[in-house]
Image (cartoon, rainbow, N blue to C red):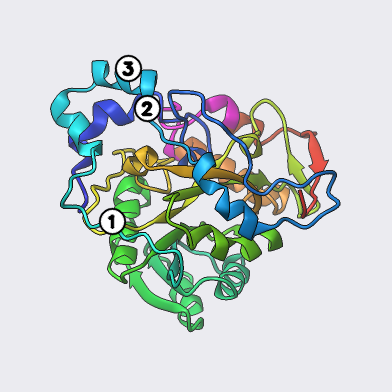
């Protein structure tokens, strides 16, 4: 079930909505939560024991909206609207500790010559199925997608929805939900999960306690050897939820935003979940200077007043000497 975002707009434009270029990948709870990693290494000397970590997941589950945070929410939201977050008895909750099907979902547009083929090849190594919505590409992107056997559903839109991203996210979610997944991994066409994350993901999903997992995403800059870190580019310092258990009958909805829409439905944030220290490379800024200038101009064109993002963040794309740190695959 997908709710009408118009009925929730006052709430989704509150503190959970970030204001930067990569806001589509993360949520911020109103209460501080325990960010204890489930897979930390001591001095980098030992490989993580994911089996043992999964046994400890129950104590690391984060429940957003508890205690004082819930009281504050109740004061701001009517009882009728708050009830959407309460789990009705009739909702069929599907929690399995083995045999879960992992489905990756992507929205793509004009990806030829970029990273899509590498991403699909990489995903094919560790997910069970892939669902793609093509946003009216004009460069043959759908043909690339068809070449991968694990792409079980490809929907090609005749007219682009890029200017109404929440509708595009809705379309992708509905397409993925129609394949009867157990877990959904929301992936952009320029993201690569680390080797460690790929090894851990089966252990993460084959448990009964957490309904979402968050990762650390790194903005690679001008190549794949360094990522950017400064006051405006610190995505990796917080956690981004991209892996969620699919529960038929649960009320899913996206905020009605034209750009920078969360990659997972906003209603997922009230479910119990875990923030990990597993890494993901975001390659969207790893190309040439010319490529970054094109992206800068696109952001300025679609959001000239900073309604959906941060103008200072946009301008920082053109920084001649950004602060770059070396990328390390492990933790």
Q: Which residue is mark 1?
A: 93
Q: Looking at this view, is 218 or 294 the one in front?
A: 218
Tag shown at residue 72: 3
Q: Looking at this view, is 306 or 87 the one in front?
A: 87
Disc 2 is placed on an element classified as: loop
- Quick check: 266 above or below 310? below
The local crowd at label 2, few if under 14, some if 14 to 19, many if 20 or more residues have their Cα within 10 Å, is: some
Tag shown at residue 66: 2
- Kindly report the distance in space between the C-alpha atoms of the residues bearing marks 3 and 1: 27 Å
Disc 3 is placed on an element classified as: helix
- Which residue is found at the position 54% from the left and 40% from the top? 60
Disc 1 is placed on an element classified as: loop
- Which residue is found at the position 50% from the left and 39% from the top? 299
Magenta-colored segment: predominant secondary structure? loop
- Which residue is found at the position 48% from the left and 41% from the top? 61
Range shown magenta = 302-313
- Total labels: the figure holds 3
Residue farthest along the left direction in this orientation:
80
The local crowd at label 3, few if under 14, some if 14 to 19, many if 20 or more residues have their Cα within 10 Å, is: some
Residue 157, visible in the rendered structure: no
Do the residues bearing badges 3 and 2 touch, measured as CB atoms within 8 Å? no
Q: Residue 76: which quarter of the image?
A: top left
């Amino acid at each position: 079930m997908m709710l009408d975002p118009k009925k929730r707009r006052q709430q989704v434009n509150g503190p959970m909505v970030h204001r930067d270029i990569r806001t589509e990948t993360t949520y911020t709870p109103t209460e501080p939560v325990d960010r204890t990693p489930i897979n930390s290494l001591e001095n980098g000397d030992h490989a993580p024991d994911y089996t043992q970590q999964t046994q400890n997941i129950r104590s690391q589950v984060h429940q957003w909206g508890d205690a004082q945070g819930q009281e504050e929410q109740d004061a701001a939201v009517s009882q009728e609207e708050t009830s959407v977050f309460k789990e009705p008895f009739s909702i069929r909750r599907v929690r399995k500790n083995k045999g879960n099907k992992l489905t990756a979902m992507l929205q793509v547009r004009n990806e030829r010559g970029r990273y899509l083929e590498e991403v699909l090849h990489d995903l094919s190594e560790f997910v069970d199925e892939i669902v793609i919505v093509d946003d009216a590409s004009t460069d043959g992107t759908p043909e690339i997608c068809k070449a991968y056997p694990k792409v079980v559903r490809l929907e090609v839109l005749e007219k682009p929805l890029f200017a109404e991203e929440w509708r595009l996210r809705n379309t992708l979610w509905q397409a993925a939900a129609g394949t009867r997944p157990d877990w959904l991994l929301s992936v952009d066409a320029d993201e690569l999960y680390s080797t460690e994350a790929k090894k851990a993901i089966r252990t993460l999903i084959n448990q009964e306690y957490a309904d979402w997992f968050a990762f650390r995403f790194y903005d690679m800059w001008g190549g794949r050897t360094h990522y950017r870190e400064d006051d405006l580019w610190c995505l990796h310092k917080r956690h981004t939820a991209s892996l969620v258990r699919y529960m038929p009958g649960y009320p899913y909805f996206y905020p009605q935003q034209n750009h920078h829409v969360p990659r997972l439905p906003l209603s997922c944030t009230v479910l119990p979940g875990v923030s990990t220290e597993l890494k993901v490379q975001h390659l969207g800024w790893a190309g040439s200077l010319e490529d970054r200038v094109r992206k800068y101009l696109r952001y300025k064109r679609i959001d000239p007043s900073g309604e959906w993002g941060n103008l200072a963040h946009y301008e920082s794309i053109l920084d001649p000497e950004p602060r770059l740190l070396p990328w390390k695959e492990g933790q």
